[in-house]
């Protein structure tokens, strides 16, 4: 067995409860900061880590491989038949288990990072009646893979049938190459915009009490908490891909949008501040962890400053040390 990393480093900051926080206030990406600095935005777009690398390009690569190697031809989807439907179901479950499972194995089974950068020192709850099966991870797997994963697949079945029967607008690569590429760039931003407003909506008390409460059982999230959602929330969250029912797009754009939404929450809920894997892979979202910790803040992510604009932003500094974006270190969303 390789040596385990030390649990703490001298540079880490923890409060009296043992909760980790960075020594700086989290900040939005420079995309919409003012005064606008084009060189800083360009650096953010192409640097590592940045907008494209590693997460968005990784998810794009997964979607491209899924499309080329595993996606049924659109014409086959003109009728609901189990040959192509079962194939999509198995493919989607394999993606969930491999992607979420990789984070969980590295951080929670093998514990390769110890508790270094772990927002909450505690490990996932066991013997807790709060969760199904009295186990937080089993509960989260059930809701993420077993429920949200089925909603993901159901939306894909229906949308592929709609494309095959020409019921929704279609964008051809050969006729509109610029718009084809533009869609790929826009999808991560659309995802964040949609997520903010859906998330605000399900914090409305009647919806929170009946729907969103389930996700917020995970005060101390782990990768499998990502899509551990009530079925209503799962449908609302994944409805981000239904924009392709209205605006002309290619089935690949729909696939990328849906897989981005389905896989992205793993890194945002892994409970650690990266980089991990020998300090090379950035991950984690202190921005979103603060939402799980305090509930009524940081509904969106850290690219579009929607929380800042609508007064729901929390920077992570202790009360009295600042609640505005004054630091130079960007948070991760």
Image (cartoon, rainbow, N blue to C red):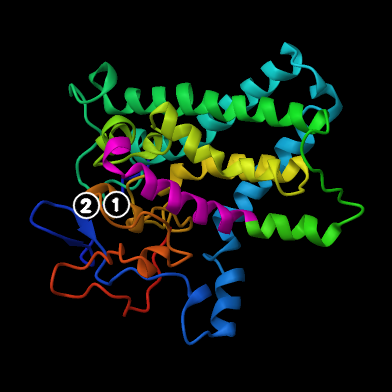
Considering only vertical position in the picture, is 223 above or below 330?
A: above
Q: Residues within 10 Å of mark 1 (few under 14, many from 20)?
A: some
Note whether residue 111 is visible.
Answer: yes
In this rendered view, identify the residue nearer to me: 196 or 54.
Answer: 196
Q: Secondary structure at mark 1?
A: helix
Q: Which residue does the image show at 79% across and 55% down from the upper left?
A: 180
As for residue 205 lying within the magenta part, the answer is: yes
Q: Residues within 10 Å of mark 2 (few under 14, many from 20)?
A: few
Res. 178 image quadrant: bottom right
Q: Which residues are magenta?
A: 187-208
Res. 81 image quadrant: top right
Note whether residue 277 is visible.
Answer: no
Question: In the rendering, which numbered label is found on residue 56?
Answer: none
Tell whether label 2 touches label 1 (CB within 8 Å).
yes
List the single residue furthest toward the left. Answer: 16
Q: Which residue does the image show at 30% across and 50% down from the upper left?
A: 5
Considering only vertical position in the picture, is 193 above or below 97?
A: below
Residue 297 image position (x, y, % from top left): 28, 57
- Residue indicated by mark 1: 291
- Magenta region, main secondary structure: helix
Residue 9 image position (x, y, % from top left): 23, 61
Find the distance from the CA under tag 1 to the CA under tag 2: 5 Å
Considering only vertical position in the picture, is 52 above or below 138?
A: below
In this rendered view, identify the residue nearer to me: 281 or 47.
Answer: 47
As for residue 278 lying within the magenta part, the answer is: no
List the single residue furthest toward the right. Answer: 174
Residue 95 image position (x, y, % from top left): 58, 32
In this rendered view, identify the residue nearer to me: 88 or 294.
Answer: 294
- Residue indicated by mark 2: 294
């Amino acid at each position: 067995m390789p040596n385990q990393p030390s649990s703490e480093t001298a540079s880490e900051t923890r409060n009296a409860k043992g909760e980790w926080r960075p020594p700086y206030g989290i900040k939005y990406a420079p995309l919409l900061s003012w005064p606008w600095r084009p060189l800083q935005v360009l650096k953010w777009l192409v640097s590592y880590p940045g907008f494209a690398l590693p997460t968005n390009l990784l998810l794009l690569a997964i979607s491209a491989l899924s499309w080329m190697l595993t996606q049924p031809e659109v014409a086959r989807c003109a009728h609901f038949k189990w040959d192509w439907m079962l194939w999509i179901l198995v493919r989607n479950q394999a993606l969930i288990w491999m992607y979420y499972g990789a984070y969980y194995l590295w951080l929670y089974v093998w514990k390769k990072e110890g508790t270094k950068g772990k927002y909450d020192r505690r490990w996932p709850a066991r013997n807790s009646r709060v969760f199904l099966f009295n186990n937080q991870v089993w509960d989260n797997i059930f809701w993420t893979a077993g429920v949200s994963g089925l909603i993901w697949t159901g939306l894909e079945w229906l949308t592929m049938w709609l494309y095959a029967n020409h019921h929704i607008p279609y964008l051809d690569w050969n006729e509109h190459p610029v718009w084809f590429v533009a869609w790929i760039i826009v999808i991560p931003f659309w995802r964040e915009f949609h997520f903010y407003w859906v998330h605000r909506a399900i914090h409305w008390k009647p919806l929170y009490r009946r729907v969103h409460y389930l996700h917020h059982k995970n005060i101390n999230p782990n990768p499998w908490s990502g899509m551990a959602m009530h079925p209503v929330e799962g449908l609302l969250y994944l409805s981000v891909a239904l924009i392709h029912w209205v605006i002309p797009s290619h089935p690949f754009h729909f696939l990328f949008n849906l897989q981005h939404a389905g896989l992205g929450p793993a890194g945002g809920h892994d409970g650690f501040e990266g980089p991990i894997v020998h300090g090379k892979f950035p991950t984690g979202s202190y921005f979103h962890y603060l939402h799980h910790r305090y509930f009524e803040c940081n509904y969106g992510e850290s690219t579009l400053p929607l929380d800042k604009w609508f007064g729901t932003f929390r920077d992570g500094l202790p009360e009295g040390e600042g609640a505005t974006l004054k630091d130079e270190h960007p948070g991760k969303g």
